[in-house]
Amino acid sequence: MGRIGAGHAETLRGLPGIGEVVVADADAARAREVAGKLGLRSVGQVDALFTAGLDAMVVATPTAAHAELVVRAVEAGLPVFVEKPVASDVDGTVQVIAAVRRADVPVQVGFQRRFDPGHVAARDAVRSGRLGWVHTVRSCTLDPAPPPDAYIPTSGGLFRDCSVHDFDGVRFVTGREVAEVVATGANRGSAVFAASGDIDTGSAVLTLDDGTLAVVSAARYNAAGYDVRLEVLGSLDGVVTGLDDRTPLSPAGEAFRPSGPPHTAFLERFAEAYEAELRAFVDVAAGRVPSPCPPEESLEAFYVAEACEISRRERRAVTIEEVRR
């Protein structure tokens, strides 16, 4: 019942086909508080969810708890929606995938950009061929302010925690896989990043399996506002998503000038996408459609993040095959 969990619970209670939303948290008082505000049922500790008569489960806990809860849920026959990542590392993700396959129960991973109208439209433009052959993709995720200091040592690092959404977005929009990465990073903000072996700013150049180049940028300090954009440039045309009246950019000339207030966080920027992915999960849980983002998709994005982290640390190009399990 943290920020994303409470947001999902509020969305779910308003979706057609949902009879009841039951919530729990390691902090039982927090669960009761959120349940009271939203008119939901709280069962206290998380273990109690498994005897609460659920039809499906949404896992929005800290990363370290994802794998165990997903495995317990599928072994109990419960379809699962889980926020990224599926597990804290590649090996853990592979183990979860094996458990999901044994249970033959659907799991959907929360890469919400797959449901963002702009990303979907960009994908459609690529598939239609109207862009010609794609030569460059540019994607960025720029946070207005860093997360709390206590979160940084457990985050997995900027590429795994933040840029993994861009990596999945690039794969989703282009329909291609990443073959090789070259990544770097810097620290000019809080000392907690360097102390944790992390970075507050990072960039990666991805070479896709058809030769397309994708440039991914991430930063924890972008006080102008929350900025997520993706550009797809082709031999015939180009498209961009995330460039609108709320994009936190100030023009150097007299061209495009945003007129609305900038987005302040991901829940606001991707509100429509978060609702759409949960609507899709309701259909998955009801057995009407297969998972639109199974754990195998999450693993591919995680491989890219892992390769970027190795590239940054060792200052060299890293192929995805080098990190693949």
Image (tube, helix red, strand yellow):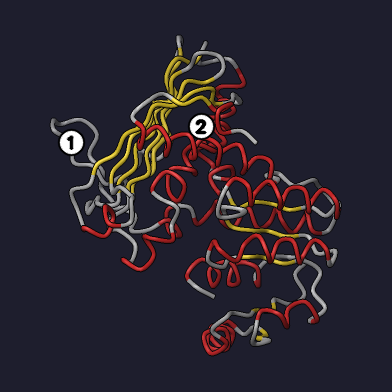
Rendering coords of residue 132 (x, y %): 52, 11
Q: Quadrant of residue 54?
A: bottom right
Rendered image: mark on residue 170: 2
Q: Nearer the viewer, residue 25 or 302?
A: 302
Find residue 115 and report its image quarter. top right
Left or right: residue 272 compared with residue 281? left
The mark that comes first in sequence, 1 or 2, is 2
Q: Quadrant of residue 45?
A: bottom right
Residue 150: x and y in percent read 35, 68
Name the foreground residue: 110 vs 236: 110
- Image point 72% across, 67% down: which residue? 57
Identify which residue is drawn at 65% across, 40% down: 297
> Quick one: 36 or 216, which is closer to the camera?
216
Give amino acid for label 1: Pro
Q: Residues within 10 Å of mark 2 (few under 14, many from 20)?
A: many
Residue annotated with mark 1: 251
Q: Quick check: 223 left or right of 26?
A: left
Residue 284 in the image: x percent, y percent?
A: 78, 53
Checking the image for residue 5, the label placed there is none
Q: Nearer the viewer, residue 309 or 18?
A: 309
Residue 171 lies left or right of residue 150; in this view the side is: right
- Quadrant of the rendering where the C terminus is positioned: top right
